[in-house]
Structure formats: structure tokens, C-alpha cells
Image (cartoon, helix red, strand yellow):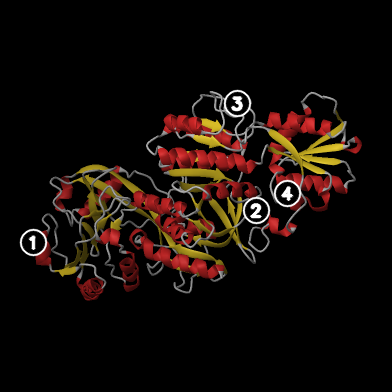
Amino acid sequence: MRVAVVGPFSGPRAAWGELLEGAAAAHDGVRWEFHDDRGDAIVARKVAETIVADGGHALVVGHFNSAGARLALPVYRCAGVPLLLPLATAPRLLDGPAGAALRWCPDDLAQLVELRSAIRRAGHTRLAVADDGSTYGAVLAQLLRGLPADGVRLVDAGDADALVVCGTHVGAAREARARRAAGFTGALYFTDDCAVDEFPGLLGDAGHAANVARLRGGAAAYVESALATAAAVLTAHPELTGTALLDAVRAHADRRFTPQGDPEPSATGTTGPGWEVVPLDPPTRPTAAHHGAGSGAGHDGKAYDVLVIGAGVLGAATADLLARQGLRVAMTAPSAEDPAATRYSGGLVRAYEPDPAMRELAVRSHRPAWREGAAPHGPSGFRRTGSLVLLGEADLDEAAKGVAELTGAGIEAALLTPRELDDRFSGLRTRDVAGAVWEPGGGYADPAATCLRHRRDAAAHGAFVLPGRVRHLDQRPDHVHVTLEQGEVGARAVVLAAGAGTPWIRGHGLTATADAPAGQPRTKRIRYAFFRLPGNPVTPTVVDLVTGLWARPQHTGLGAGGWLVGRPADEWDVPPGGADTVTAAQAEHIREGAVRRWPGLARAEFLGGRHGVDLFTADGRPLIGPDPSTPRVVFATGGSGAGFKTAPAVAESAAAHALAALG
């Protein structure tokens, strides 16, 4: 069973993500998949959309950030995905239709009431309230100022004997240090975001006479309870989904919930809802350790070992390999605005390539899953149709060498004559063909399913998922600083597997790697159309080196029951992207070229088409290896139209280069 765990696993609030990681590690039998929302509300909404689009998660645990939970909840509610909220404390968070979420913790109004009571019990009578400048802190401060006086009078900081600082633990520490430097000597009180181990170190000498509000028993107990309940219910009832699953979680939990999903105030479980105010412990570690010194974290919180940029099959496969090494790996998530080239790939699978270097990658990538013929409904949707590569006279010598290499690697292959082609494949016009490489084990896979399998495997091995576009990379002495749409992260190394998006991320002046010649990679638009060919007499996948055409059957999805045909066009230096459309004129251009090889297409019904964008290198070989100018950035891009079938081998090379960059 797959459960999405959402929280701040990097960024200034990464200390809270550690609670989620630790609790998940204690429970087997469930695939915990970590999605990093960095404690940011807008990112949280993007994370929710990614999780729902995946469609394979039984439920979600998180979000930590209340503002993010408020934006994400409608997404989960519409999709029928249950949400468990261990630590989101905003008042009235679950307003709306019931049956979508359960909240483990009490809300912030109760926290602020307990803070005022603790201040009064300590004998303080003059209270000042400050915030760290964040929206979160400002809202808490406003709520606190609106509570009844109850024997404690609100005053300016200069006249106060107690000061409450509301906000995030990093911001609150900064504000408190400034207040101490300005001369405040009274007692300090902090709201619950500061109840993490690293906070005393952040406060330093300013932490004397300091207290912090926290969930009764500590926040870790609430996280542990929520994840333990989810694991127990899913293990016992893996068939449950939606409302039925949420009802089972409600029944199994160690606390009672209101019909809306909030914890009942009278709950008396082992960690029953409530707040307490406790003295702040002195720091146990040097302050620098809390900032990730030496790890590339800087001011951004906990850094990743490797960030893989790219949502396609190559990026996902690379993230999977690196996560299996026990590294702290993050991968970018696909989105409707940034579809990977994999989404529009034809998915052709074969081992023969006319270029020896590309052939070596294709042979290495020819996994047992292809060789043994996985079921069409398996994780990659592979269909063994056989593969033909049609040859001109100039291609025959290299083809003979290639067939020998394939058979030597245990891949069945043969060099067919034109007569053998005519005998075996009716409807295929071969008068200008000098021969063909035939691979009975070739065929095609479902690119989206293959990509999703790698992403799920990476997540199952601990890779984090980050949403949003990457804008810029900046190598620092010990890490790469990565700017995303919604914030910044640090990584000790970056694998840039963004395909056609690479020039827009890295800059159009891409340099060569040690394994690739100079010459700027260029983007190129790729189009193909679906036609219904009566009788569909040609069944294998076909790559035509004479005309540049490629084709295969289409069994499911767009164009199901038809014949996919692609024809090259000189559309270069275009922005990345794609769609499930081609115009009638574009389809006719494809048809006009294809009838040279399949005359029956002249009368075939047009069923639709797709277009995408690939990145082509000067010699047609992938760009793999570190950028000489920024060696912590590893290129894994430029598949030149062959990226899908060579992705496993390229991912292995990219992962090896990333490990070398880590030292």
C-alpha cells in the first residue's frame, strides 16, 4: 500500500520533516512516499495535485503547514483521497463537507489560551506580543492580542515582563535575538513551531528565561500515532479506499473525533489532545550543526545529497538507482505545465542502433523485462511485436556488425534480405530497401507507465518528490543552490535530466562534457499521427533508416486499434512541451511520406496524433557526465529521439557520475 507523507523535508522548517521520516521508518508493510512541500502553502497545493494525478496513493499523511493543508484539502476532497493531519493547528481548518480528513491535534486557539494561562501562573502581568514577519506568525499574534486580558495586560515591549514571539522557529529565534540585543531582559515565550530540537541552538545566548508551547507529550507522539494508525488499518484492510478507509482509521485511532474530523476536547487517549508550556532546554549541539554546516544546506535547511531534475523516464530511473544507494535523493515532479518528453514518446524498444555507441547503450538497456515479454498490463505495458530496422545499401555493413553484437549479448536478431521482408510482411513496400535488422523480442512499451514505475520505485526507496519548475542552478563550494518556482533548495550534486528543458534551465550556452563533442544541443519538435489501416497487416515496430519514418501498432489509449506513424520535420530550436494534437495538415504531411512505405495508408482514417520536443546533440549521442565548469552538475540529457529505450543505461552512467561528484 502506498501512502504519501507530505511535509517540509528541506528548507527552513526541515526539522519538522524529520519527525515524519522517523515515525514512518518504524512501520513496515506500507510504502511511505515522501513529498517535500518545504512548509510553503503554494508548494503544498502543487504537491496535492501531483499526488492526486498519480492516482495510486491510498491516503495522505500531512501537511504540516496549516496554510498548505487548507489549500490542499479541496484537492484531496474532490479526488476522494483521505487526509490525516497530525500537526496542522489552524482553527476551523476542516470547515466544509465532512468525511475528507481527520486531525490529530488541537488548534491554535487552545494553544494561545494555554500560553496566556502559563504566563499568568508564572506571575507575569505585563505582556508584549511580537511576530517574526511571516504570515503564520502575524496571524497567531493577532489572535493572541484578541484574547481576554485575564489578569495579564498587553503593553509595549519596553514595559513588559514577558514577551511572546509568534512564528516559525528560524524567524522567532531571529526576532528574539534582536529583542535581547535591544535590551529586553524579561521572560520569553514561543509558539509551537519552536518546539524542535534545533531551536535552543538557534537562540543561543538569547535563550535564558525562555519557554515554549507544545502539544502535550510532544509533537512526535501525534505524528507517531497518526502513522501507526494508518499502517495498522492499511495492513489489515488493504482493500479499503476513500470514505470507508477514513472511517476505519477513525475507529482504530487512540482518540475520538468530532463528525467534522477534529479531535474531541474530552479525548483521553495516551497522548490526548492538549497543549502545555515547558521551559526551553539548553542547546545540546553547536548552532552551526542546525544550519547544516558542511552539507550544502546553508540557510535553506536540510540539504539533499542529489537532486534529480527531470520528470521523465531517465530522471525517474536515475533517482531510483541513487535512492537504492541509501542517499538522500529528491526528484522533481511532473506537472501539466511541464510535461516530460516521455509523455509524448512512441516508446519503441529494440537493441539495434546503427551508431556503435548508441547501440552499446541500447544493448545495456535491453532488460529481461523486454526480453521475456512482460504482460501488456504489467508495470511498463510492454508489448512484444517484434522490431524491424529498414536499411539502405550504406547501412548493411554496420548492421552485420550490430547483429553479431546483439546475438553475442543473448538478444535474438537476424539480418533479413528484401525477399525475406516481402515474404514475411505484407503491405510493406520494400523496393528501395537493401535489408532489415529483425529482433523478435522488440516491440514497444507504455512510456507513461514505465516512467511512473520508476518514480514509484524511487519513492519506495526513500526518494523525496519536489514540485515546481527549476529556474536556475548555481554551484557553491560545497553544494549546488537550486532555485525553483516556489523557493530554493540545496543539494551536494544535481543530475540534470530535463531533456528539452535543459537549455532553459542551464542556459543556452551548454558546454561539452568529457564524453561529448562541442556543439550546442538543439531542440526539435517530433510529431506522429494515428491511422486506422484496414486489416492492420504490418504488426512489428518499424524504424526506416531510408526515409526517416517510424511506426508501430497502437493497442490502447489515443488511436487505439490504429497504426502510429512518425515522419521527421525540420522544426528546430522550439520551446519544450507537447500535446495530444496534430492538425489535419500536419497529419497529411505524415501520410504523404508514409504511403511510400505503406501504400494502404493513402485511404486510412486519421484518428488523431501527438507532438512533443526532444533535445538533439551534435553527434546524436546523449550528453552524459559532469559539466566541466560546474562539476557538481551532471548532465543526463540529449537522447536525440532515442532516449526512451536507452534510459536504463544512461541512468546507470548518470548515477555513477553523481556518486563521483559526491566524493
Q: Residue at x 65, y 53 (%)?
A: 301
Q: Residue at x 48, y 63 (%)?
A: 325
Residue 163 place in picture, x, y as percent: 83, 38
Viewed as shown, does residue 161 lie left or right of 59?
Answer: right
Q: Which mark is residue 423?
A: 1
Is the residue marked by circle 2 packed among few (<14), some (14-19), or many (20+) residues within 10 Å? many
Q: Are marks 4 and 3 in contact (CB under 8 Å)?
A: no
Which numbered disc flags the more N-terminal residue, 3 or 1? 3
Name the element at disc 3: loop
- Cα gap from disc 1 to disc 4, whole angstroms: 77 Å
- Cα gap from disc 3 to disc 1, whole angstroms: 77 Å
Residue 45 place in picture, x, y as percent: 54, 39
Depth check, mark 3 against mark 2: the one in front is 3
- Cα gap from disc 2 to disc 4, whole angstroms: 13 Å
Q: Which mark is residue 301?
A: 2
Residue 616 place in picture, x, y as percent: 40, 62
- Cα gap from disc 2 to disc 1, whole angstroms: 66 Å
Q: Quadrant of residue 269?
A: top right
Residue at the disc numbered 4? 199
- Cα gap from disc 3 to disc 2, whole angstroms: 35 Å
Depth check, mark 4 against mark 3: the one in front is 3
Viewed as shown, does residue 222 lie left or right of 124?
Answer: left
